[in-house]
Amino acid sequence: MPAERYRLTPRLFVGVLLSLCWLSQAALADHPTLALSSEQERYSLDPYTAYVADPHRTLTLEALLSDPIVFTPAQQRSDLHLGYTPAPMWLRAELRNASDLPQQWIVQFEYPFLDYVRLHVVRDQDTQVLESGSAVPVSQRALPHRQAVFPLPLAPGETVILLTRIEAHGSKMLSANVLQPERFYASNDRQNFWLATYFGMLLALGVYNLLLFFGLRERVFLHYALFVFGFTLAILTFNGTGTLIFWSGLGEHSGRLVTLGFTLASAMATLFAQSFLDTATYSPRWHRMLGLFRLWCWLAVAMALILPMQAALQVMDVTGFSAALLLLACAVSSSLRHVPGARLFTLAWSILLLGASVFALRNLGILPSNFITLHGIQIGSALEMLLLSFALAARFNKLKRQKEQAQAEMLTSLKRHEAALEQKVAERTAKLEAMASSDMLTGLLNRIGLARSASSALQRSRRTQQPAALLMLDLDDFKPINDRFGHAAGDLVLQQVARRITEQARAGDHCARFGGDEFIVLVENCGTEQDVAEIRQRLLETITAPIDLPSGHRVSVGVSIGSSRYTGGPPDFEELLRQADSAMYRTKGQTGERFRE
């Protein structure tokens, strides 16, 4: 007997284990049934939902109905938030109409970013298949809505089983509700109103700051506008409004717009922070750090377009979360340095992170589901955008005041320098007039300057009844110097001759280069003919003296001089020129009147 008793003990132990396993499976298979009453408008489907993964994509509706597939009941709301689970998920829930009257209900999945949601309504007689999801064209959805929603009519006392297959590249948040149509449409109208207000505000802020950029040419406004547009594109797609209204035909590729929008917004946010906080001036280290992080953001933008969808979404999450923390840390550091506008910038980013945290805690079931927790991201981003817009408005007013002050200072400066400028203009005008009246090579008067000086000189001579003389000088043997030594040597000879003429002239005499190798000397108060002859003699002697060239050669030029005198009557400068010119040509070829070596 003792031996037989010891042999039975292992068998008994195995039997107990098998019984416990069977009981646990039976308990898992015994899902609670949600009794729907017309007295209540809304039910959460989470406590009545069980789930199972389909990693090999082999589970079918027939297999779920015929084979003993074990579903895992959702013990709490967070159990239905599965993150980036690659496998499709099956959900099972059982509903019963507790009323004696037929009822209409709507099944609503809260998370809008679910690609494919296929609902099988299993009844006693048949099974109805309904489809929805962000990747499903609007025309093929059970109801045209930004979320996955399905109509559910129930006969009196009818019990149905809901088997839902869900595929999503993004995070799988599978919470659902059952609502009466009146409650659903009333809630939908409120949500649409707030969403329209939200997106209208974002669009207005983006366009307004873009116009400010075109008006002021301040890049901070452009960076903010691009940040708003990128964020708007992502949120518009993420909450299903974009796929419902604008790009339903993109299918599952619409998720690319979410990744592209958020990564682009992250890159623009770093540029905006650098411009707004002036990190290049106040925080060079943060400026370099944000610049390096932006390189990663641009790489993330490229990955958002080429990586598989789920990997692109994960890169987007890492980039967005890192950008938010980095910008908040930069803002706090700038606030400690008392950078203008940094405190408001810090408050704005803190509110955005708070809104995202509230949304995440609600998804985990830690916070209750209400308007604030359901739209935490939208509320946080709206407040953030408004605060940043207020900060930009303050910056705009500051720029306006600085511009007005600069204009006032500029006007004062203009008035202060106006007198000096007028004086400079007068001096410059006189200098230009002198340049217009002077020969560029020799510095003597040119024809225009000579004509002006001669007119004044002859008028004075007529008033004072003092004679004036005009001497015309023409260089002889000048052309061979140009031909042999070049024009540079010829210019040097002309300059030396001009200097010698100026040295022999008196202080009130007028010396001019009349053209080529011809010179004029207009002498006021010349006295007698003998005085004119002495002037001619001095000019002859000094001009014909040898001239040393830079090349080491020594040259000499001859000169023919003719003169004319004004002793009264109407002043006629041209007549004096003709008389002097005739006298000069009479001297050419006469010994004693021409000097050369």
Image: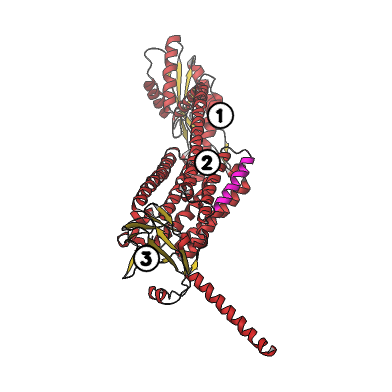
- Magenta-highlighted residues: 323-338
Badge 3 amino acid = Val
Q: What residue is shown at x 52% (from left), y 60% (from top)?
A: 76
The answer to whether the residues at label 2 and label 3 have Cβ atoms under 8 Å apart is no
What distance separates the C-alpha of mark 2 from that of mark 3? 117 Å
Badge 1 amino acid = Thr
Above or below — where is 144 with respect to 31?
Answer: above
* Image quarter of the N terminus: bottom right
**Which one is closest to the eye, mark 2 or mark 3?**
3
Question: Circle 3 sits in a helix, a strand or a loop, which is it?
Answer: strand
Q: Which residue is mark 2?
A: 489
Q: Which residue is mark 1?
A: 542
Q: Mark 1 or 3 closer to N-term?
A: 3
- Helix, strand or loop: magenta stretch: helix
Q: How many marks?
A: 3
**Which one is closest to the eye, mark 1 or mark 3?**
3
Q: Mark 2 or 3 closer to N-term?
A: 3
- Is residue 501 part of the magenta span, yes or no? no
Q: Which residue is mark 3?
A: 160
The answer to whether the residues at label 2 and label 1 have Cβ atoms under 8 Å apart is no
Judging depth in this view, the residue of 24 and 183 nearest the camera is 24
**Which residue is situated farthest in the left direction here?**
139
Q: Position of residue 592 (x, y in %)?
A: 50, 29
* Image quarter of the C terminus: top right
Badge 2 amino acid = Ala
Q: Residues within 10 Å of mark 2 (few under 14, many from 20)?
A: some
**Does any portion of residue 310 appear in the rendered image?**
yes
**Does any portion of residue 481 appear in the rendered image?**
no
